[in-house]
Image (cartoon, rainbow, N blue to C red):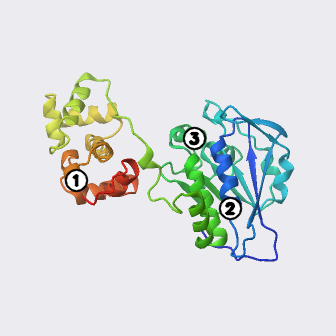
Amino acid sequence: MCTRRDRDTTREPHRVVVVVRDGLLGMEFGSVHRLFGQARSDDGEPLYSVVTCTATPGPVRTDSDVSIVVERGLEAVADADTVIVPASDLDYGDDPVSDTALFQRIRPGTRIASICTGAFVLAAAGLLDGRRATTHWASAEQFRALYPQVRLEPNVLYTHDGDVLTAAGEASGIDLCLYMIRCDFGSAVANRVARGTVVPPHRSGGQAQYVAPPVRRSTASSIAAAQEWALERLHEPLSNEALASSVSMSVRTFTRRFTAEVGVSPAKWIAQQRVQRAKELLENTDHTIDRVAAEAGFGTATSLRQQLMADIGVSPRAYRATWAGVTSSR
């Protein structure tokens, strides 16, 4: 839970230490410095000091064609109020790089945060055991396999569990930084930083609205045929009986084989495909919400809204405004 900290004007600025690794994602690094660096008190005094450190001081490669020179070593974290670990492009391999030596230098009570696959570093050190955490949706399956003891929430933009926070991806690192500023110094300060950066102070929904889930296809010809048949008729009522009949199978046999092949029940799969169809229509057409609901098989705009809110945390109009830039009230 975000609890605003009382500002002691006699104290030095809150010290944020960014721990970078080879393959640093430059956007995450720059966002942390920019956002915390813009935070000012009402009289214009900086509320944070932000420094960078790395395990071996010197040049650190980024994910672009430039490197940065980092002069500080891990000793910098010893007097940190907040430590932030951004992602590295090396995290996206089969064996994520995790340097855990730094956590031995962090004093108790220090706030620790990760951005994107930086969560792998926190998890490898055991900091996320039993805690809520998130990481980039594309790495969620790998993360869950490596760290089953972590309560992974792959659909949210960020998490806050005790003194440990995690953000889902590069842009959600901005959401997390603004959240921490809001926790530390209140909404007015965070909103000023958001306006200065030309970003919303808070985004609705979670990661789910940014994920394009694959259509789960069966390798069994009969089940695959039923899937193709259903995808052409999402606007129609689709019962298990109708799907089974399309491939001349009994409902019991069809349901059992479908679930075994696809991994979810026929009803669940149909619901997933209808959500995906609705998202595609919202992005790529100017159909009214009522028409989108009908063509995707939800029947009414109310049913579509309820399903989208449950699945991705935003309304059809909000989703369209994000992805299609359509502001029509239809």
**Whole-Å distance between the Cαs marked 1 and 2?**
41 Å
User: Of the residues under marks 2 and 3, which one precedes in the sequence?
Assistant: 2
Q: Which mark lies nearer to you, 3 or 1?
A: 1
Q: Amino acid at mark 3?
A: Phe
Quadrant of the image occupied by residue 244: top left
Q: Which residue is mark 3?
A: 143
Q: Amino acid at mark 1?
A: Thr
Q: Position of residue 96 (x, y in %)?
A: 65, 35
Q: Position of residue 217 (x, y in %)?
A: 32, 30
Q: Quadrant of the N terminus?
A: bottom right
Q: Which residue is mark 2?
A: 38
The residue lying toward the viewer, choosing from 281 and 97, is: 281
Q: Is residue 199 left or right of residue 71?
A: left
Q: Residue at x 33, y 52 (%)?
A: 326
Q: Position of residue 180 (x, y in %)?
A: 63, 63
Label 3 residue SS: helix
Q: Which mark lies nearer to you, 2 or 3?
A: 2
Q: Residue at x 68, y 47 (%)?
A: 29
Mark 1 Cα within 10 Å, few/some/many (few <14, many 20+)?
some
Q: Which residue is mark 1?
A: 288
- Please determine whether, in this image, residue 73 is positioned above or below residue 243: below
Q: Is residue 53 left or right of residue 31?
A: right
Mark 3 Cα within 10 Å, few/some/many (few <14, many 20+)?
many
Q: Is residue 134 visible?
A: no
Label 2 residue SS: helix
User: Of the residues under marks 3 and 1, which one precedes in the sequence?
Assistant: 3
Q: Is residue 76 left or right of residue 97?
A: right
**Whole-Å distance between the Cαs marked 2 and 3?**
33 Å
Q: Quadrant of the C terminus?
A: bottom left
Q: Residue at x 59, y 54 (%)?
A: 174
Label 1 residue SS: loop
Q: Is residue 160 visible?
A: yes
